[in-house]
Image (tube, rainbow, N blue to C red):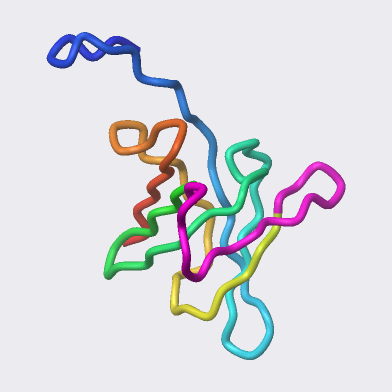
Amino acid sequence: MKDIKNNSVKADVSGSISVCKGRSGNVQFWTKSYFFSQEVTVKVTDNKIIFSHIGIDYIGKSSKFHLRDGWYNSSILAEIPIGKYDFEQEESNEDVVTIYYR
């Protein structure tokens, strides 16, 4: 997809992620998106979740998704509605995936 304003090419990041109930207040994420083959940071706001790849110099909390039978899986402690959510195309790229849940 070409961004005319910046004269650059935006990577096509498409897919979805399922949010399921986990143990002890955790929620589990399940996805087939290759984006999650690398460690990410997870930022939860009132209406969206932003997953970002971490850089070499990053120091802080990150989440690693584990590959099981073709599915990437991880869990975090958060209050997120259970369901399947599509990646927001306008805000997602090869380094960031955004989903809206409300």
Prevailing secondary structure class for the magenta stretch in the rendered image = loop
Residue displayed at 38% across by 54% down:
50
* Magenta stretch bounds: 54-72
Q: Residue furthest bottom?
A: 24
Q: Is residue 96 left or right of residue 76?
A: left
Q: Quadrant of residue 19?
A: bottom right
Between 1 and 18, the one lying in front of the other is: 1
Quadrant that contains the C terminus: bottom left
Residue 45 locus on image (x, y percent) = 30, 68
Q: Is residue 73 above or below residue 8?
A: below
Q: Is residue 97 left or right of residue 82?
A: left
Residue displayed at 45% across by 62% down:
42
Residue displayed at 45% across by 52% down:
51
Q: Is residue 67 above or below residue 80?
A: above
Residue displayed at 46% across by 57% down:
58
Q: Quadrant of residue 70?
A: top right
Q: Is residue 92 left or right of residue 27?
A: left
Residue 77 locus on image (x, y percent) = 53, 80
As for residue 52 lying within the magenta part, the answer is no
As for residue 71 lying within the magenta part, the answer is yes
Residue 71 locus on image (x, y percent) = 75, 47
Quadrant that contains the N terminus: top left
